[in-house]
Image: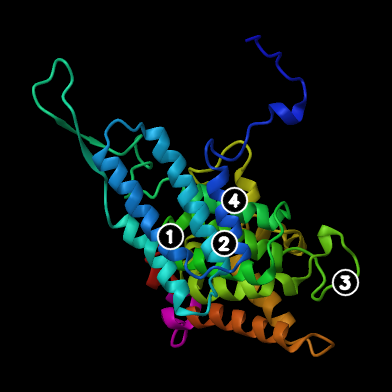
Amino acid sequence: MEASTPSTDPQRTTPDPIPKGSRSFRASVDTSVLQQDQEMWKRARLFVRNITSRYTNYANQPIDIFERDLHNLWYLFIGAAKVTPTDEAAADRLAIQVLVAREMGLLRRLEEPGTDEKAAHISEAANGAPSRMWVDLPFLATDLREAWKEAMTGRTAVPSNQLANLGGFTARLVAFGVCEVELSQCGLLLLREALETPRPILPTDSADQKDIPLSHFMPALSAWLRHGSYKLLGLCARGHASASSTDDAESPEDQWVTAGPLLSTLSPEQRSRTPGFSMTRWEFWKQRLAEVAGDHGALEDTVQGQARHCFGFLDSWERITGGDGHDREIARKAYYGIE
């Protein structure tokens, strides 16, 4: 057989983002999403068991196979999250499946003795922390962040209701302490696009990406803040701004933590405190939500109502953490142990 000539077509040389051998699996997930399949959580649960069983029972399978399986597993979870209504108990059940996987701990298996060994030895499913299966949930944060990046940049068209469902799923994981910092940055990206970026509140006749209305993001924002606002307050109170260890050359830190254009009206001193999570941004979000909630013009009741709920989620946690009976800043520092 003749050797093939390397292609000069840039489309042919671009790395395939889909792991080898995964196309048919992901196509089946996409079909289930289109069909609004409410049984996908069972498939995810069984896939976790399947991966575990194959790793522990068949030592001849290389770790690369399981890396592919993990990426496919999270693709399945993300697909299931998009079609699982965030305000139903089924959404809790889906997120709990991730906790169940994590609580299986570090996978270990018996390896047959080598030529110079007398007895079988134990190996661990790890390429080094934070890639230990299942305890570190390898690639979950990376793959969920990629899904959010695609949704926020418009590379993947995600309907508003599916974005809300995904928001509720991600925020639940954050509330459970799953990849807390990395996944909280997905919420930060949503808040930046929804509240810190100039955009019409309601749909317009323009098809320009810039004109995606605030109303498109409000259901997702409401779901996020309902389940994750307590964690966001803690990160803002501590001024957390470090880059995630999952960032790479195509996901620079500023994509996730830089404040949006609407904050450019702040003073230089305030802007210096806006990278990452900060109380400056927290207060701006409350201000913007109050503006939308208080607009008595032609806004749809649902948009105003969602804005009021979002404001309430933020404000309530300030009160719960001591702000009802004390100065909020002093109470917040005491609650979170900030010097």
| Left or right placement of residue 61 versus residue 313 in this view | left
Looking at the picture, how far across and down is residue 318, in whole percent? 49, 79
Front: mark 3 or 1: 1
Name the residue that disc number 3 marks. Answer: 204
SS under mark 2: helix
Say which quarter of the image contains residue 293.
bottom right
Q: Is the magenta stretch mostly helix, strand or loop?
A: helix
In the image, residue 221 lies at what x, y percent?
62, 72
Amino acid type at circle 4 is Ala
Amino acid under disc 2: Ser
The answer to the question of whether label 4 and label 1 lie on touching residues, with beta carbons closer than 8 A, is no
Name the residue at 90% across, 65% down. 206
The amino acid type of the residue labelled 3 equals: Thr
- Would you name the residue on which mark 2 appears? 32
Front residue (pair 105, 183) = 105
Q: Mark 1 points at which residue?
A: 43
Q: Please give left or right for residue 211 compared with residue 33 in the image.
A: right
Secondary structure under tag 1 reads helix
The furthest residue to the left: 118
